[in-house]
Amino acid sequence: MSEKPYHHGNLRNSLIEAGIELINKKGEDGLSLRKVAARCGVSHSAPYSHFKNKDELLQGMQHHVTNLFMTALESAIETYSDSQDPEILIQMGKAYVLFFINQPHYFSFLFSHSSMSVNLAMDDDGTDNFPPFEILRQHSFRILKSLGMDDQTIKDSIITMWSTVHGLASIATMKNVRYDKSWETKIEDLLRNTQGDLNDERKFEKSRHVQND
């Protein structure tokens, strides 16, 4: 390929987006700075002004998607003045699913080709946890604690909630899954149904504890 000067947009982000597209199609073995440069129509040396090697590019790709994901979740939370409003959990879950519906290539990359890590034991301060999951964990823990739930039940509920939104995101981004409704308009209904199930479970647990006492 003949070398071409770069004339459009932000080169670093363009290289990252090209890398995500390439790794989703070819896998990590098919990713290289040279191939990403070719996709962007720039010289083979151009990416090296932003990334020293393939590992730095991969790290940049993960940080890029993770930061966009966190922004989407935080935007859903910022509209609430009451930090203990349970509605936050619904809107945060909705933002989670919509983020990947609007950018399905991010879902495949983030959960198949990146080095993200989630600690479902939730037995530390969350420093090394996947940041978007940590946002979900912290807000959920605070809100559910205010509703009188014990720590273990809160942890179980967080896993259930994360499984729900992550599962919906996975299904909604699968090309071979057909759905006769609009995901964008049905997500909130589905999440509210799930929250209703959780409320029923809480009532059952509370009733059981009262009977045992």
Image (tube, helix red, strand yellow):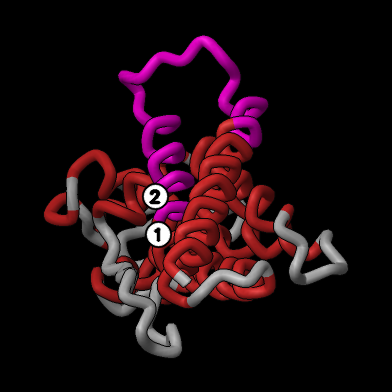
Return the residue at label 1. 159
- Direction from residue 24 to residue 93 in the image, left or right: right
Image quadrant in which the N terminus is located: top left
At a point 49% along the width and 73% down the height, the residue shown is 134
Magenta-drawn stretch contains 55 = no
Q: Which one is nearer the viewer's eye here, 103 or 80?
A: 80
Instruction: Using the image, tell me which numbered label, if any, was put on residue 116.
Output: none
The Cα atoms of the two marked residues, 2 and 1, are separated by 6 Å
- Direction from residue 138 to residue 174 in the image, left or right: left
Q: Residue furthest right?
A: 81
Callout 2–callout 1 Cβ contact below 8 Å:
yes
User: Label 1 crowding class (10 Å Cα cut-off): few <14, some 14-19, many 20+?
Assistant: some
Magenta-drawn stretch contains 177 = yes
Q: Residue furthest left?
A: 29
208 up-or-down from 213: above or below = above
Q: What residue range appears in magenta?
A: 160-189
Q: Amino acid at mark 1?
A: Ile
The quarter of the displayed image where residue 159 is located = bottom left
At a point 53% along the width and 61% down the height, the residue shown is 206
Q: Position of residue 48 (x, y in %)?
A: 35, 73
Return the residue at label 2. 163
